Image: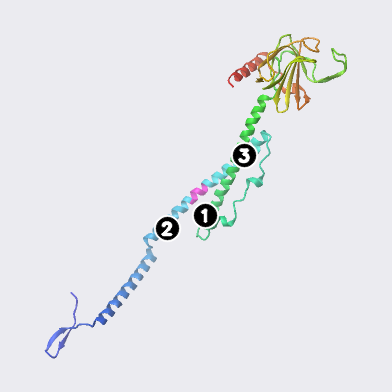
Amino acid sequence: MFNHKYFLDLTDLQYKKVRLPWKSKLSRFALWSVAAVVLTIIYSWVLNGTFGSPKEKELSQEIENLKLKYSIMGMKIDNALNTLDDLELSDGNRYRPVLDMDSIPVSIRNMGTGGVERYEDLVGYSNSGLMLTYRKKVVEIKNRATIQFESFRAIEEKKNEWKREMEYLPMISPVNIIYRLGDGMKFRDKHPVLGTPQWHHGQDFSTPYGTNVYATGSGKVIEAGWNSGFGNCIVIDHGYGYRSTYGHLSNIKVTTGLNVKRGDLIGLSGNTGTSTGPHLHYQIDLYGQHKNPLYYFNDDLTEDEYFDMIQTLTAQSKFR
């Protein structure tokens, strides 16, 4: 119940209720409203200062969660950088030297990560330093990973080319290695047939008449026919500057323009051309320069090992 004030009206000797003018009522209402607002503000300020607002608590928790995520991301970034270090080390010390490729300069691997304006959106925050550090590391990973990807792609291409080159180079004996070697690369004071001094630019194999002769590397037959000096002769272009010659054959089993694989039977040894007896003249030229064939194959195989190799090469050729 509200307390009301009364006064004694002397005109009629009665107590009557005191009634305030409307202005006074308005003033009192305004005063109470202001007091209520002030008290509310003071209460909120004290309460928030002591315990914090729910919104602030929510934001604080979110900030802590973000810091935790940044910390986990930082460990992952460091692990990624360590992995990149290992990949770059293998790239420079293993793969490229083996394939005779130049190493990637440090200046290219350590490309710049952009100017200050690139990170303007991260400036001005309480944790700007942390965010800038991680952003720069992420950009570094992106740049280095891109360079490493391109490097591995170049290595893969070089590996495939190297593998193809190894297949094409003349790198086995043209006949069974059990056969005795004849004259090698040397200057002969007297040619056995012509009787004049001259160079012998290949390796002779003292083989029986009709011995199988095999292609020593993959390539294209560019000559298959009669040669005035070598008689029945085959010349194979292996690419990469290499050519191999097989002379004094009794029989030719390939034709000009035919592509052959290492280990393919291409002819039979004989005694045609300028020759004193059955043998095979085998010659290797690199960009027109004569090379010693003995440097291009291993002669410590047994007869069985040699024919196992030929059979393996022949089988591989059939499935290509």
- State the colouring used for the structure image: rainbow
Q: In the figure, residue 266 lies in which quadrant?
A: top right
Which circle, 3 or 1, is nearer the viewer?
A: 3
Amino acid type shown at disc 1: Met
Crowding at dot 3, Cα within 10 Å, few <14 / some 14-19 / many 20+, comes out as: some
- What residue is pinned by disc 3? 151
2 or 3: tag closer to the N-terminus: 2
Give the x, y percent position of residue 109.
63, 45
CA gap between label 3 and label 1 equals 30 Å
Amino acid type shown at disc 3: Ser
Of the numbered discs in the image, which one, if any, rests on residue 60? 2
Check if mark 2's residue and mark 1's residue have beta carbons within 8 Å: no
Give the x, y percent position of residue 213.
70, 14
Of the numbered discs in the image, which one, if any, rests on residue 257? none
Give the x, y percent position of residue 127.
50, 57
Q: Residue at x 67, y 27 (%)?
A: 165
Crowding at dot 2, Cα within 10 Å, few <14 / some 14-19 / many 20+, comes out as: few
Q: Residue at x 66, y 47 (%)?
A: 107
Q: Is residue 156 above or below residue 108?
A: above
- What residue is pinned by disc 1? 131
The N terminus lies in which quarter of the figure?
Answer: bottom left
Amino acid type shown at disc 2: Ser
CA gap between label 2 and label 3 equals 46 Å
Query: Bounds of the magenta span?
Result: 70-75
